[in-house]
Image (cartoon, grey):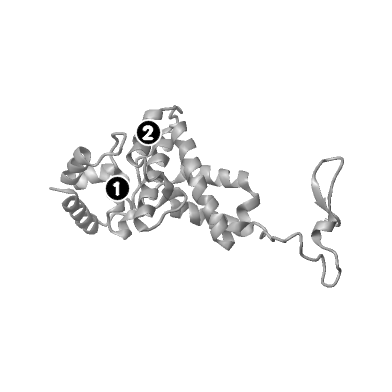
Amino acid sequence: MDFDQTISLLNRTLTAKDPDTFSSSWVLKHAPRCYRFICRNIRTETGRIDWDRVTFALEKKFQRRWMPERKSKNLAPYEDSFEVDAVLNKYSDKLYVFLAPSDRTDKAIRNSISISLVRLAQYGNLLAKQEAMKLVGYTIEGWIERYRFMSRWRSYDEEVQKQLERCIRRYRYSGSFLHYLFCTLQYAGRGLPPIYEYSLDEPVAFGSGKSWLENVYEDVETNEIRIHGW
């Protein structure tokens, strides 16, 4: 029995049973052969069962039904650099994907790295959370520059970090963590006012003869740069 056969059998079992949700316990009960193969062969870089790889390979209609076993809310935070290094060393020459993925393969690798780090963060590894926020932060910066509707986040760095932290904490189903994050920022950003950008060389008003630059001054009390009338 190999991976493809395991996924095929699991898909058939899910189709026959048609559960509203399923978990590792459900797989053990209803597809024990699949469970045994997965336990023996499908592991993450840190040795845990890689249910993300399994569920991502299932039919789309079943992916969102995945309900992972609840982690204890009392998980003690810890710092384990070996876990983080196990993920990063596997893709040491591919970390550029968070800055400039060149094709679908790069995007798949970016997704794999981000999910691995997010899962470690959910287990309580603070270093994995820091690394995930740093690497994914590069991708968010790219979105803000590339997509007009994302540019609204440009002046909300602190809120972007909060949204990213929430997504890391709440991410549940398999698929793309970055797609989940992208949609979260897209929807949450709808309530933000759009950013309007001006060149300081542009005239304040048509025919005025004065540019925005001429209206710029420094507030001596606050040391802030301001524009007259604003």
Q: From the top left corner, tell me how far across and down residue 89 is, in percent.
A: 35, 37
Disc 2 residue crowd, few under 14, some 14–19, many 20+, Cα 10 Å: some
Identify the disc placed on residue 63: none
Q: Is residue 116 above or below residue 211?
A: above
Residue 156 place in picture, x, y as percent: 64, 49
Q: Nearer the viewer, residue 114 or 7?
A: 114
Residue sticking out furthest to the bottom: 207
Could you say where residue 7 lies in the image, as x and y percent from the top left? 21, 52
Residue, disc 1: 53
In the picture, which quadrant includes the C terminus?
A: bottom right
Does residue 23 appear anywhere in the picture?
A: no
Please tell me whether mark 1 sits on a helix, a strand or a loop.
helix
- At x 86%, y 55%, the residue is 228
Q: Nearer the viewer, residue 131 or 54?
A: 131
Residue 221 in view in this figure: yes
Closer to viewer: mark 1 or mark 2: 2
- Amino acid under disc 1: Arg
Give the percent coordinates (x, y) of residue 27.
24, 46
Relative placement, left or right, of 37 versus 47 is left
Of mark 1 and mark 2, the one earlier in the sequence is 1
Q: CA distance from mark 1 to mark 2?
A: 20 Å
* Left or right: 148 as drawn, with respect to 216: left
Image quadrant in which you'd find residue 114: top left
Check disc 1: other Cα within 10 Å, few if <14, some if 14-19, many if 20+. Answer: some
- Which residue matches tag 2? 85
